[in-house]
Image: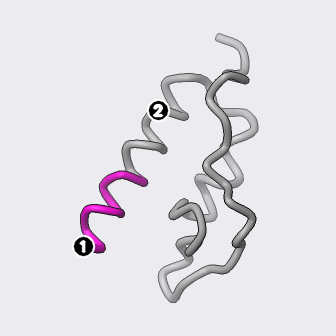
Amino acid sequence: MGRAKYIQSPCVMICTLDENDICVGCLRSLEEIGRWPDANTDERIEILDRITERCSDAG
């Protein structure tokens, strides 16, 4: 499977990490940020699902 160019990065250009190394702008981990350019559609959806979970956990 090739790159999933139609699922855009959730980056909002607020690139600051919290104490758990999660970006406060897009809520991705450093690993997820690094993986994004090469991630296929399924991987990108999984990352977006984890972001949704982090939003829910944050209240």
Name which residue lies at 54% across and 34% down.
44
Q: Residue furthest top?
A: 1
- Mark 2: give few (<14), some (14-19) or many (20+) Cα within 10 Å: few
User: Split into 4 quadrants, where in the image is the N terminus?
Assistant: top right
Amino acid on which disc 1 is placed? Gly
Q: Which of labels 1 and 2 is toward the front?
A: 1
Instruction: Name the spot of residue 3 as percent of width and height, x first.
Output: 72, 21
Q: Main secondary structure of the magenta part?
A: helix
The region drawn magenta spans: 51-59
Q: Earlier in the sequence, mark 1 or mark 2?
A: 2
Query: For residue 51, what is the image quadrant?
Result: bottom left
Amino acid on which disc 2 is placed? Ile
Q: Which residue is mark 1?
A: 59
Is residue 52 highlighted in magenta?
yes
Residue 55 in the image: above or below residue 22: above
User: Considering the numbered disc 1 on the image, is that residue within a helix, a strand or a loop?
Assistant: loop
Residue 38 in the image: above or below residue 54: above
Is residue 34 highlighted in magenta?
no
Instruction: Name the spot of residue 29 as percent of width and height, x first.
Output: 55, 63
Give the CA separation, mark 1 to mark 2: 22 Å
The colour style of the image is one colour
CB within 8 Å, label 1 to label 2:
no
Name which residue lies at 67% across and 43% down.
9
Q: Nearer the viewer, residue 7 or 34?
A: 7
Name which residue lies at 61% across and 57% down.
31
Indicate left or right for 19 with 57 as reference: right
User: Split into 4 quadrants, where in the image is the C terminus?
Assistant: bottom left
- Mark 1: give few (<14), some (14-19) or many (20+) Cα within 10 Å: few
Q: Which residue is mark 2?
A: 45
Indicate left or right for 52 with 14 as reference: left
Residue 31 in the image: above or below residue 36: below
